[in-house]
Image (cartoon, coloured by chain):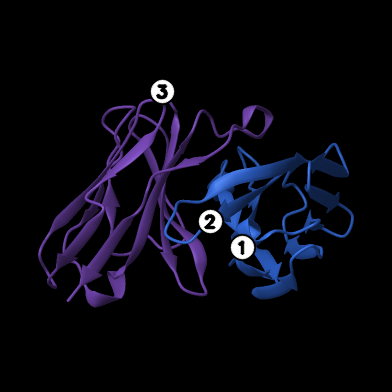
Amino acid sequence: EAQVTQNPRYLITVTGKKLTVTCSQNMNHEYMSWYRQDPGLGLRQIYYSMNVEVTDKGDVPEGYKVSRKEKRNFPLILESPSPNQTSLYFCASSLRSGVSSYNEQFFGPGTRLTVL
Amino acid sequence: GENVEQHPSTLSVQEGDSAVIKCTYSDSASNYFPWYKQELGKRPQLIIDIRSNVGEKKDQRIAVTLNKTAKHFSLHITETQPEDSAVYFCAALGEADRGSTLGRLYFGRGTQLTVWP
């Protein structure tokens, strides 16, 4: 089944304890992205990746890191989580990102993170 | 980069009535405008999209219109049903190969649609 998966789905942690949220897609998609969703603020992009080893900052990258060593995986790393990073996180992927060949962006199931 | 504004933030309608959600965008080079529906506790899913070479697109009870001159696009849902209740997001695609907007989707803040039976 074609899908985007995220793990964990729920996580409660404490300030300063490094964590990684994994994202994987099995559709051979080039483009992957991380968003955070907060009430009233919609979906804000954290980082995105056009392809392997190509990543760039979105609108709210502070406090986050990403890597794209393989096409299928795009982990989100919080080196020192803080309470303001409590949020719902979505990973998404699409086949390509060019306007002329843009394809639907598929979202993962979401990870609800609470930082105490 | 692109800025997408979405209105209203909440919308309540009676079952059977129509619902309209409007979005404006700032980058005149944007060429692709998808709409996503997010049901409670679920992930956003694409419901309809439109490219700049057309002014309107329909899919059963939903339609999207685009006015490139005015830089706004709208989602129209007719004969609303309780299962249409969800958060709807509009988005605009930043034109590829334009620096930091490279192929990025910019989302509006969402509209909570409630359809009362």
Relative image position of residue A113 (x, y in whole percent): 26, 64
Q: Which hue belongs to chain B?
A: blue
SS of the residue under disc 1: loop
Say left or right for A37 vs B78: left
Compare marks 2 and 1 and give the one earlier in the sequence: 2
A83 relative to B63, above or below: below
The residue type indicated by label 1 comes to Ser
x, y (%) of residue B91?
A: 64, 53
Residue at 84 percent of width and 51 percent of height: B65
Residue B85: mark in rendering: 1
Query: What residue does disc 3 label?
Result: A28
Hey, which quadrant is residue B4 in on the image? bottom right
Chain A in the picture: what colour?
A: purple
Residue A45 drawn above or below residue A32? below
The amino acid type, in three-letter code, at marker 3 is Asn
Q: Chain of mark 2?
A: B
Amino acid at circle 2: Gln
- Mark 3 falls within which chain? A
The residue lying toward the viewer, choosing from A10 and A81, is A10
Task: Point out residue B114 in the picture as x, y percentages from the top left corner.
Answer: 64, 70
Query: Closer to the camera: disc 3 or disc 1?
Result: 1
Residue depicted at x 27% and y 41%: A67
Q: Nearer the viewer, mark 3 or mark 2?
A: 2
> Quadrant of the image for the N terminus of chain B?
bottom right
Which type of secondary structure does the marked residue at label 3 adopt? loop
Label 3 crowd (10 A; few <14 / some 14-19 / many >=20): few
Q: CA distance from mark 3 to mark 2?
A: 24 Å
Taking depth in this image into account, of A46 and B47 the one nearest to the observer is: B47
Q: Marks 2 and 3: in contact by CB < 8 Å?
A: no
Q: Whole-Å distance between the Cαs marked 3 and 1?
A: 33 Å
